[in-house]
Amino acid sequence: MNESRRAKLQAFDLKVDRLLEPTRNFTPTIWLFTTATALGDFGMLWHIVGIVRAVADNSRAKQALILSALMGVESLILNQGIKPFFKRKRPTIKGDTRFKIRTPRTSSFPSGHASSAFFAAVVLTRWSSSPAIATWFVFAVIVATSRVVVRIHHASDIFAGALIGTAMGLVAHFAISFF
């Protein structure tokens, strides 16, 4: 990446970071984003969503299994196939001290939380109606945003993660018809 693009990317990341600073001092958003980032660890939120949907309607048990299996494939592709090509440093090593979060082991780019969140939201659209679809994407945006708020990702990391997750989700969405 040339210096001009790098400078623009850094300026964008800094602008978003400054914009989100007030959320780091407001108790309800500290709770929201700490919880969201924890639930995003290992795609836990999406596995819970699959289980809750299956418990509410046992005909969705196969969907829960498919979602969890696909989440594993998405994670493998992102963390072992894509992330190793980028060695971007995180904004902080352990995140903002106002948030109690797990210390990540991989590089910053792209965001795995954003990727898995948007991947799951897209996959879940296959089995959901409008109100639920909106809910999946609201959850995805909150999980992705939480990573910038807790200062463990740059804003550009989550945008890239969201795009990658969406693209993989669209592939999976159409591949599901073979199951």
Image: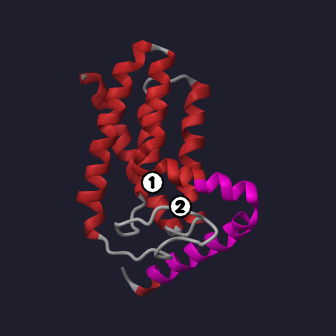
Depth check: give the residue in front, 9 or 152.
152
Q: Residue most toward the bottom?
A: 3
Q: Residue at x 45, y 79 (%)?
A: 5
| Amino acid at pointer 2 | Arg
Q: Is residue 32 magenta?
A: yes
* Position of residue 6 measured from the top left corner of the image (x, y, whole percent): 45, 81
Q: Residue at x 41, y 34 (%)?
A: 123
**Residue 144 shows which numbered tag?**
none
| Amino acid at pointer 1 | His
Above or below for 94 versus 66 = below
Left of 58 or right of it: where is 131? right
Task: Give the main secondary structure of the magenta stretch.
Answer: helix
Q: Residue at x 52, y 79 (%)?
A: 10
Dot 1 alpha-carbon crowd within 10 angstroms: few under 14, some 14 to 19, many 20 or more: many
Badge 1 or badge 2: first in the primary sequence: 1
Magenta region, residue range: 5-34
* Position of residue 69 measured from the top left corner of the image (x, y, whole percent): 29, 35
Question: Which element is circle 1 on?
Answer: helix
Residue where numbered disc 1 is placed: 113
Res. 162 visible in picture: no
Question: Which element is circle 2 on?
Answer: helix
Q: Quadrant of the N terminus?
A: bottom left
Q: Quadrant of the C terminus?
A: top left
Q: Is residue 176 magenta?
A: no
Above or below for 91 versus 102 = below
Circles 1 and 2 in contact, beta carbons < 8 Å: yes
Q: CA distance from mark 1 to mark 2?
A: 8 Å
Left of 173 or right of it: where is 27? right
Residue where numbered disc 2 is placed: 147
Depth check: give the residue in front, 105 or 141.
105
